[in-house]
Amino acid sequence: MGEVDPAFIQDPEHRPKLCFSEAEGIPMIDLYPSREKDPSALDRLVKEVGSACKEWGFFQVINHGVPLDHRHKVEAAAREFFGESKEEKNKVRRDAVKVLGYYDTEHTKNVRDWKEVFDFSVEEPTLVPASLDPHNQDVTHWHNQWPHYPPYLREVCQEYAKDMVKLALELMELIALSLGLHQKRFHEFFKDQTSFIRLNHYPPCPSPQLALGVGRHKDSGVLTILAQDDVGGLEVKRKSDGEWVRVRPTPNAYIINVGDTIQVWSNEAYESVEHRVMVNSEKERFSIPFFLNPSHYTMVEPLEELVNENYPAKYKPYNWGKFLVTRKRSNFMKLDVENIQIYHFKV
Ligand code: OGA
Ligand code: NI
């Protein structure tokens, strides 16, 4: 591929700089104390998580408890799957009805992303609203589409999904404590969670100065847990000065970022942060984000404990399932209207 299709080309103001600065100071947090009985160590950890959420919206974790061999198996399966022919991958292709599976024409803000993905949900099946009509309460199901090759992909992905849910709930306990909430405050939202995992493959790109692997965006769910390989390319818009800075890969660590849903729940104590993915002309890159999402029937709104006369709610309640389905649909159809965003629910 010598030339880049115009669909991939970013407007000049959104094109990446090929010479980038690596982020100094994205917090690296050791989760070891969360499994220990030492209350003062746990207290320090909670403070670290709280200030990382506040100052950055992004942090990395080590000693996270996810077995390394589970991660390696999913990484190997992803590499094998994306190495299959287009014909084979298209057998599990996503369409307007089957929203999970393989996809290579995703757009972010109406510019095509230089990537291919494979999505699968954590709950099988995942319950979601059948209709976007606010008065229609019917529920439908999302089903995973598992490829035949490689045959072990399904099992390792399902095993890894359990690891992700466990880590995510642990992180949500720390975040709850950091907001002065009961440790298990968030658990109720994840009973019929709509969380999903995405295997990302970013092939080498002949014009990395014009296109992006993923255009600038915020994650709309609760929390994202990202495994990136050693190539690097994830850039975060630093809150302190608005500069794009790159997250340096740390072997076996996970990158955590706050999504829009936490921004609303916390009444903006914690804000989700814009990020994007640069591609490069030599190396392909793989990454695996886990998107923690609540149940479809969750009404997302600022938590009552965090709202009072001095801090009135900054958002009106919205139904997570309808929001999610609207997003999926408009991403699929590449509508020329702006995607639904949380600021549409700002008071
Ligand atoms: C995403 C995302 C980052 C990456 O898929 O939402 O931000 O490094 N991915 O792949
Ligand atoms: Ni993202």
Image (tube, rainbow, N blue to C red):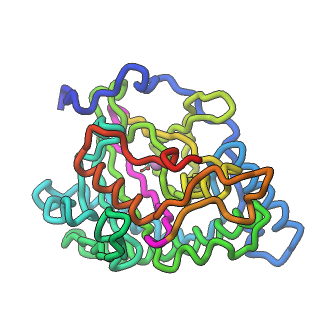
Residue that appears at 59% across and 52% down = 315
Q: Position of residue 79 (x, y in %)?
A: 31, 57
The verdict on residue 287 being magenta is yes
In-image side of 228 versus 39 (left or right): left
- Image quarter (top left, top right, bottom left or bottom right) of the N terminus: top left
Q: Is residue 16 left or right of residue 50?
A: left
Observer-nearest of 315 and 170: 315
Question: What residue range appears in magenta?
Answer: 280-297
Above or below 339: residue 289: below
Q: Quarter of the image holding residue 143?
A: bottom left
On the image, the x and y values in percent for residue 316 come to 56, 55
Q: Residue at x 69, y 70 (%)?
A: 173
Which residue is at a point 14% across and 54% down the rendered structure image? 86
In the picture, residue 36 is in which quadrant? bottom right
View extreme (front): residue: 135
Q: Residue 123: where, in percent of width, then height?
A: 40, 77
Q: How many tags in the picture?
A: 0
Residue 283 visible within the image = no
Q: Residue at x 20, y 59 (%)?
A: 96
127 w.r.t. 208: above or below: below
Position of residue 179 in the picture relative to residue 2 (left or right):
right
